Image (spheres, rainbow, N blue to C red):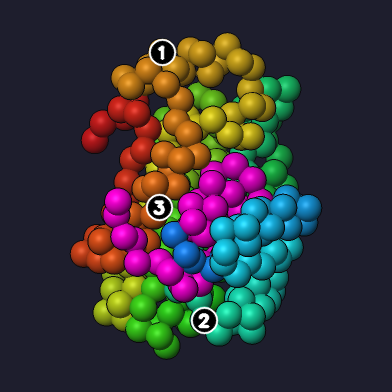
Amino acid sequence: MADYGLKGRIAVITGGGRGIGRGIALALAREGANVVIADVLAEQAQKTAREAEAEGVGALAIVADVSDKAQVNRLVEDTIGSFGRVDILINNAGVSPKKDGAKVTVVEMDTDEWERVIGVNLHGSFYCARACAREMVKQGYGKIINMSSLAGRTYSAIPGAHYLASKAAVIGLTRALAGELAPYGINVNAIAPGRIESEMIRDVPSEINELYLQKIPVNRLGTHEDIANTALFLVSDLAGYITGVTVDVNGGSLML
């Protein structure tokens, strides 16, 4: 069994209260990392933190909206106050609004919705990376994972333009951060999940997911564990020579 070398590390997971974020947080906890669960949903964040503590590690739940830079700065300050450092950032928080189970088209989309999605998915990733990187630079060590999407790699008819644009931009942000932070011992990579069984895919009709499933060569939807296992590798020292990369985890539905 692989030794990821994460025992005692301090990991911040945004959107960690449920779904993919929860899966990653618990996977990190099982490998001995202390976790900070940041989410806008207090009850979900606290529940995940309790589950992580059951693995014998330290866990902290913090309510934070990542689109608000003041809340992000407080999140990192509270992490440092509780654990003394921050070693890992998982930029997972994201939103993808729908209307009656369908995407909101460009001609229907109002500015407030556009700004909210860009604010959470892109600005939030930047605010969190900036705040954590300032601490990681002092340490000379850090691992950052930004969550992109298959929709950020190619066109998708399911999410709206705001989601596609934000997830494509996250890939560019990842490259910029990787290049700037590499001299300080900080690796920055992105994960681009395909169709994953999570809360986000349940806001569209089931027949849409069935049609999507037919296009996946491995003949199944992805799981939280598929993403968590990828994250474990990327934040470990096993991936010390990997930075600026976007890892596609999509069952073969897009092969680049």
Left or right side of 109 for 214: left
Q: Name the amino acid type tagged 1.
A: Gln
Residue for badge 2: 85
Q: Mark 2: few, some, or many residues within 10 Å (few <14, many ≥20)?
A: some
Residue at 59 percent of width and 42 percent of height: 19
Q: Where is residue 45 in the image (x, y as percent from the top left)?
A: 70, 55
Cα separation between marks 1 and 3: 26 Å
The residue nearer to you, when weighing 115 against 90, is 90
Is 242 on the left or on the right of 67, as rendered?
Answer: left
Circle 2/circle 1 CB separation < 8 Å: no
Q: In this view, does 41 lie above or below 184?
A: above
Q: What's the CA distance linking mark 2 and mark 1?
A: 45 Å
Residue that numbered label 1 is attached to: 214
Q: Quick one: SS at disc 1?
A: loop
Above/below status of 107 relative to 214:
below
Gap in angstroms between the C-alphas marked 3 and 2: 20 Å
Q: What stretch is highlighted in magenta?
A: 1-30
**Mark 1 surroundings within 10 Å by alpha-carbon count, few (fewer than 14), some (14 through 19), many (20 or more):** few
Local secondary structure at mark 2: loop
**How far across and down, in percent of the image, does residue 148 sit?**
45, 47
Left or right: residue 174 compared with residue 183: right
The type of residue carrying mark 3 is: Ala
